[in-house]
Image (cartoon, rainbow, N blue to C red):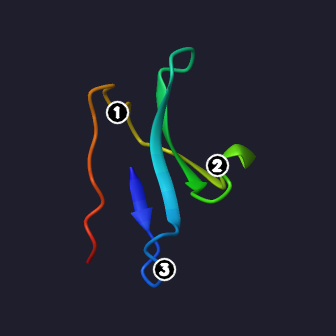
Amino acid sequence: MFAPHPDHTEQGWVLTVVYDGAQHSSELWIYDSETLGAGPICRLALPSVIPHSFHGVWQGA
């Protein structure tokens, strides 16, 4: 999902949940929307597996 920058809504971050079947674990990977090819700028381990059917939208505060 796309999370826009609060001051520059055409820029932001792309968030995706990645499942590792070998480790049976999930991570949240965060990409800079302007440099997707550079790989994730952050990888966050999640406390439990997120199902493949999970999806959502960004809701500003």
Question: Mark on residue 4?
Answer: none
Is residue 9 rendered to the left or right of residue 45? Answer: left
Picture coordinates of residue 36, whole percent (x, y):
64, 49
Q: Residue at x 28, y 35 (%)?
A: 54
Query: Within the image, what quadrant is residue 33 found in?
Result: bottom right
The relative height of residue 13 versus residue 11 in the rendered view (above or below) is above
Q: What quarter of the picture does the C terminus occupy?
A: bottom left
Amino acid under label 1?
Ile
At horizontal 46% and vertical 85% (from top left) the residue drawn is 7
Residue under numbered circle 2: 36
Q: Residue at x 49, y 53 (%)?
A: 14
Q: In what element is the residue under mark 3? A: loop
Q: Identify the mark nearer the N-term, 2 or 3.
A: 3
Is residue 47 left or right of 38 when viewed as pictured? left
**Quarter holding residue 46:** top left
Badge 2 element: helix
Tag 3: amino acid: His
Disc 2 packing (10 Å; few <14; some 14–19; many ≥20): few
The label nearer to you, 1 versus 3, is: 3
Residue drawn at x 34%, y 33% is 50
For marks 1 and 2, the one nearer the N-term is: 2
Q: Disc 3 designates what residue?
A: 8
For the residue pair 53 and 9, the one nearer the viewer reads as 9
Residue position marked by numbered label 1 in the rendering? 50
Residue type at mark 2 is Leu
